[in-house]
Amino acid sequence: MKNHYQQCRFLLGTPDLRSAPPDSGAEVAFAGRSNAGKSSALNVITGQRSLARISKAPGRTREINFFLVMGNLRLVDLPGYGYAKVSKAMQKQWQQHIDRYLETRQSLIGVFLLMDIRHPLKDFDQLVLRWCGAAGLQVHVLLTKADKLKRGAANAALLQVRRKLMELHPGASLQLFSSLTRDGTDAAREKLDDWLGIKGELTGSAID
């Protein structure tokens, strides 16, 4: 399928919403724990090697980073949570900025929630799912690092998370994803295309 995200470019990074782009158009936010592979996933999905900064030390994304897709459509990389080697006070501040973004950003139309397939549904993940469910905000779960498990184990994890989603956010969708092998890339792009209303060549996908 066509990749509509190759021309995606960095707009700005801000620690809070005071310097954010105008709250109009449509945004999809990428959220997850600091070791879930958000930056790698963003780079693979957009087809750009260094759109989002990748660090060997999880938790280096300390700002809300906005990326322009086209027109008034954006992707947003939220600070990772729960793993970074920073003070508890700093982690609390990050959490407050994430909460404020999710609660007040009118252009936010959905959240891509990334979880390491080996450690899914941590407290933060469940919090985001419950909040989005209550707010009527759509969520698509990427079970990242799927290459770390054999196919049978990966599918078992997928089923386990799907069952839990029925409790936490019945409307959420999910898929397997690997930044290393690129498995799941087309499915993720198709979901973004659908949410952002981008027209183009569509194919069948592995999205549930």
Image (cartoon, rainbow, N blue to C red):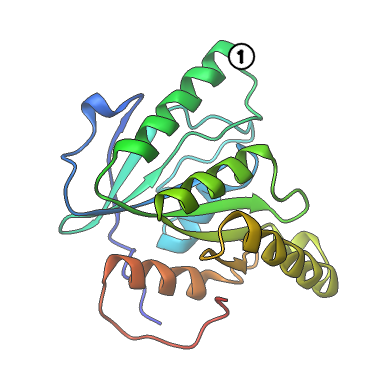
The N terminus: image quadrant? bottom left
- The residue lying at 53 percent from left, 15 percent from top is 90
- The residue lying at 31 percent from left, 42 percent from top is 66
Q: Position of residue 155 (x, y in %)?
A: 77, 72
On the image, which quarter does residue 190 sit in? bottom left
Structural crowding at the residue carrying mark 1, measured as other residues with C-alpha within 10 Å and reported as few (<14), some (14–19) or many (≥20): few
- Residue nearest the observer in this picture, 182 or 124: 124
**Is 57 above or below relative to 140?**
above
- The residue lying at 26 percent from left, 72 percent from top is 198
Q: Position of residue 175 (x, y in %)?
A: 60, 69
- The residue lying at 55 percent from left, 76 percent from top is 207
Q: Is residue 154 left or right of residue 19?
A: right
**Is 128 above or below relative to 146?**
above
Q: Is residue 188 left or right of residue 10?
A: right
**Is 117 above or below relative to 174?**
above
**Which residue matches tag 1?**
88
Secondary structure beneath dot 1 equals helix
- Residue nearest the observer in this picture, 49 or 15: 15
Q: Position of residue 70 (x, y in %)?
A: 20, 60
Q: How many marks?
A: 1
Q: Position of residue 108 (x, y in %)?
A: 31, 49
Q: Could you tell me the amino acid type at mark 1?
A: Lys
